[in-house]
Image (tube, helix red, strand yellow):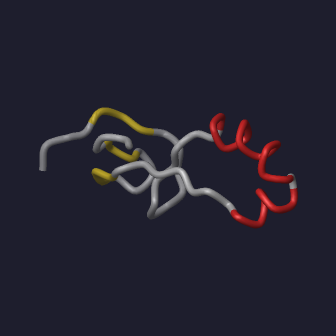
Amino acid sequence: MFGVTWCKNCQRNVIPVKEFDVRKSILFLYIFYLPVYWREKPHCPYCGGKKFEPAKAD
């Protein structure tokens, strides 16, 4: 889904992710949750940061 990028918070190359939250989708009824999921920014799977740069060579 997303390419490798550099996370500014944890200082390493990561692949950002977006996670579908089942609890929120049940709470907001599935139809109303989809726009919220689509607008959500990807985050670092390790630290949860949302600030990225292009990937750096190891």
Residue 40: where, in percent of width, then height? 64, 40
Q: Name above or below for residue 29 compared with residue 2.
A: below
Residue 29: where, in percent of width, then height? 85, 53
Residue at (65%, 34%) from the top-left corner?
39
Residue 27: where, in percent of width, then height? 87, 60
Q: Point out the image quarter for the N terminus.
A: top left
Q: Is residue 11 left or right of residue 50?
A: left
Q: Is residue 29 left or right of residue 1?
A: right
Residue at (86%, 53%) from the top-left corner?
28
Q: Quadrant of residue 52?
A: top left
Q: How many marks?
A: 0
Q: Is residue 7 left or right of residue 21?
A: left
Q: Quadrant of residue 2?
A: top left
Q: Is residue 16 left or right of residue 5?
A: right
Residue at (73%, 41%) from the top-left corner?
36
Residue 13: where, in percent of width, then height? 28, 51
Residue at (77%, 57%) from the top-left corner?
25
Quick one: which residue is furthest to the left in this view?
58
In front here: 32 or 41?
Answer: 32
In front here: 19 or 15?
Answer: 19
Q: Name above or below for residue 2 compared with residue 10.
A: above
